[in-house]
Image (cartoon, rainbow, N blue to C red):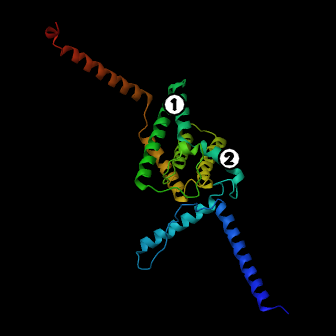
């Protein structure tokens, strides 16, 4: 028969063991790649019945957006569920960066052999510049922070902006895909390849936890509408030559008139 002192000691040992196991479990959870990283503040989606129905609906949709984005960020770091696919997702991400597209477009424009090819590359370059300006404008106005699960890399530190809404990769992928389908692609297999590339680029933004779902959705819609504007404002090669010749003639006339206005007697 055990004494009261031995029973108290056994109870204390059990309590200490349970506390140690809980602390160890919490330490393992904090060391892993969690959605709310250290220093990150979770968004407050608490609602009250006294709030307007629009506010309640908006907070509910934002909560769904946050939850779904968290579930899709399976390549956020090496310790994530699909962390082994992170290098492949980053490669797809790089294929949608603006600088490689601009460099490749300008190079093809300068090396173009026909007028039609140069005209297409010229409008593609203008479309890329338009996309960069519009995305930067919306991001500056909205100023939505990126998901706290997002992990900065050496490459992303130079190319990825700190604001999240909208996704520039998604808008660029949608705009370029529609541009290619309308101007360059004429076979079914290439159409599938272009659409698949745009879908993978947009999906990589969610898998890497770079953006929320609403960022990517709005970016796709924005890029799709951008091509309509580019098509409406299409710049032909003859129009460009006429514009450059007109500007050159204006500068020559200005310089020629300036020479006649000089007081030659005073200079002599």
Image quarter for residue 240? Answer: top left
Residue 67 appears at what percent x and percent y? 58, 65
Q: Residue furthest right?
A: 1
Q: Mark 1 falls on what kind of element?
A: helix
Q: Quadrant of the N terminus?
A: bottom right
Q: Quadrant of the C terminus?
A: top left
Residue 106 badge: 1
Image quarter for residue 257? Answer: top left
Mark earlier in primary sequence (2, 1): 2
Q: How many marks?
A: 2
Q: Nearer the viewer, residue 61 or 114?
A: 61
Is the residue 101 above or below the residue 245 in the image? below
Neighbourhood count class around disc 1 (C-alpha, 10 Å): few under 14, some 14–19, many 20 upward: some
Q: Mark 2 falls on what kind of element?
A: helix
**Residue 218 visible to the viewer:** yes
Is label 2 in contact with label 1 (beta carbons under 8 Å)? no
Q: Residue at x 55, y 67 (%)?
A: 64
Residue 84 appears at what percent x and percent y? 72, 51
Q: Residue at x 54, y 33 (%)?
A: 103
Q: Residue at x 46, y 39 (%)?
A: 129
Residue 87 badge: 2
């Amino acid at each position: 028969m055990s004494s009261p002192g031995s029973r108290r000691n056994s109870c204390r040992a059990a309590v200490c063991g349970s506390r140690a196991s809980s602390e160890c479990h919490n330490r393992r959870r904090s060391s892993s790649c969690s959605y709310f990283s250290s220093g990150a503040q979770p968004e407050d989606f608490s609602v009250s019945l006294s709030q307007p129905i629009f506010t309640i609906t908006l907070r509910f949709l934002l909560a769904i957006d946050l939850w779904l984005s968290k579930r899709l960020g399976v390549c956020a770091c090496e310790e994530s569920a699909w962390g082994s696919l992170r290098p492949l997702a980053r490669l797809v991400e790089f294929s949608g960066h603006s600088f490689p597209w601009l460099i490749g477009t300008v190079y093809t424009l300068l090396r173009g052999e026909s007028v039609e090819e140069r005209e297409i590359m010229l409008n593609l370059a203008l479309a890329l510049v338009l996309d960069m300006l519009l995305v930067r404008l919306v991001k500056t106005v909205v100023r939505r922070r990126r998901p706290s699960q997002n992990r900065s890399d050496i490459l992303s530190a130079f190319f990825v902006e700190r604001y999240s809404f909208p996704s520039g990769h998604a808008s660029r992928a949608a705009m370029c895909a529609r541009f290619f389908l309308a101007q360059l692609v004429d076979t079914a297999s290439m159409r599938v390849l272009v659409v698949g590339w745009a879908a993978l680029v947009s999906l990589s933004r969610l898998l890497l936890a770079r953006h929320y779902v609403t960022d990517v959705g709005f970016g796709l819609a924005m890029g799709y509408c951008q091509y309509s504007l580019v098509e409406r404002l299409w710049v032909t090669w003859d129009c460009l030559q006429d514009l450059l010749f007109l500007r050159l003639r204006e500068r020559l006339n200005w310089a020629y008139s300036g020479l006649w206005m000089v007081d030659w007697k005073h200079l002599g």
